[in-house]
Image (tube, coloured by chain):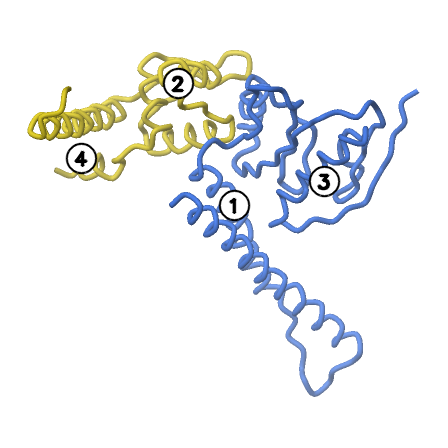
Amino acid sequence: MKQSITKFKWFWAWQDEKEEEWLAEMAAEGLHLQGFAFPTLYRFQKEQPAKIVYRLDYPGGKKKERDSYLQLFADAGWEHVGDMGGWVYFRRPIQPGAPTEIFSDVESKVQKYARVMLFLVILMPIWIAGRPSFDPESMTVFKNIVLALYTAFMLLWAFAFFKLGQRIKNLKDSAK
Amino acid sequence: MVKNGKLEKQLPLTEATYYILVALMQPQHGYAVMQDVERMSEGTVKLGPGTLYGALTNLEQSKMINKVGEEDRRKIYVITAFGQDVLDTQVDRLKVMIQSAARKHKIAGNKP
């Protein structure tokens, strides 16, 4: 009888490596990712502990390209575990001599974060179009809350942009 | 000259891109490219699937390779005439690079 366990965990877009590590730690405890009940809700299956490497990609691109994309990863020995918010989750057992990375050079790793940033740029017109325009003369508690939430999201958006830019810069510096 | 400018923009090729183009002088799918590159480079270039997928997408966008078929969800690509021009130019430059080092060795009196 296999036991299924659901865990809630929040990772920001720039914390993909932290998330990979966490999933590997879970696998070491015998909790193997099965998929997602909902974004941020990780479904695990309790089995034998195992040394597993998890890798996340953010491929972007067209839906019709998806089959050949997943096939290439499968051919290379990577199991597709699930998807969440545009991120694709892969894993493979750690074995001597077997690769543990889905990206083999810095350029392609930089491009992954550039695709995440591109998604954030696409959101910008939505932010601008949806900004609340309240008359400062007639502010209510509700309007103040909306304004505060909007400002918080904007700041978070800007921060995500900054963090991803930093990741790219660090990657480029490490290649020098 | 316009075409030459377009060609220059693609140079120099990265190690990965160079080998991918060489592999695609024969039509093949992604995983076959991965294996071919590892063999040709004597194990020095092992392409991750994320890297290869990104490189194939970029090469297709810059019209250096073309999709020529599909087999069990695997896309088959081949190098285009433009891609071959880029690759040949890169090979010429690499030859110059190798010769220049060889010449300096000779002047310095080193054994080849």
Left or right for B25, reference B7: right
Between discs 2 and 4, the one toward the N terminus: 4
> What residue does disc 4 label?
B3
Chain identifier for the yellow-coloured part of the image: B
- Occupied quadrant, residue B95: top left
Q: Amino acid at mark 2?
A: Val
Cα separation, mark 2 vs mark 1, equals: 26 Å
Do the residues indicated by labels 4 and 3 lie within the same chain of the protein? no
The residue shown at (22%, 28%) is B90
Q: Amino acid at mark 3?
A: Trp
Residue at point 18%, 39% (across, down): B5
Q: Nearer the viewer, mark 2 or mark 4?
A: 2
Residues A173 and B103: in front is B103
Density class for disc 1 (Cα within 10 Å; few <14, some 14-19, many ≥20) is many
Task: From the top left corner, tell me how far across and down residue A107 is, in percent.
Answer: 42, 39
Q: Categorize mark 4 by other alpha carbons within 10 Å: few (<14), some (14-19), many (20+).
A: few
Q: Position of residue A105 (x, y in %)?
A: 44, 34
Foreground tag (4 vs 1): 1
Against A141, residue A104 (above or below) is: above
Q: Alpha-carbon distance for marks 2 and 4?
A: 28 Å
The residue at which mark 3 appears reads as: A22
Marks 4 and 1, Cα distance to the nearest angstrom? 32 Å
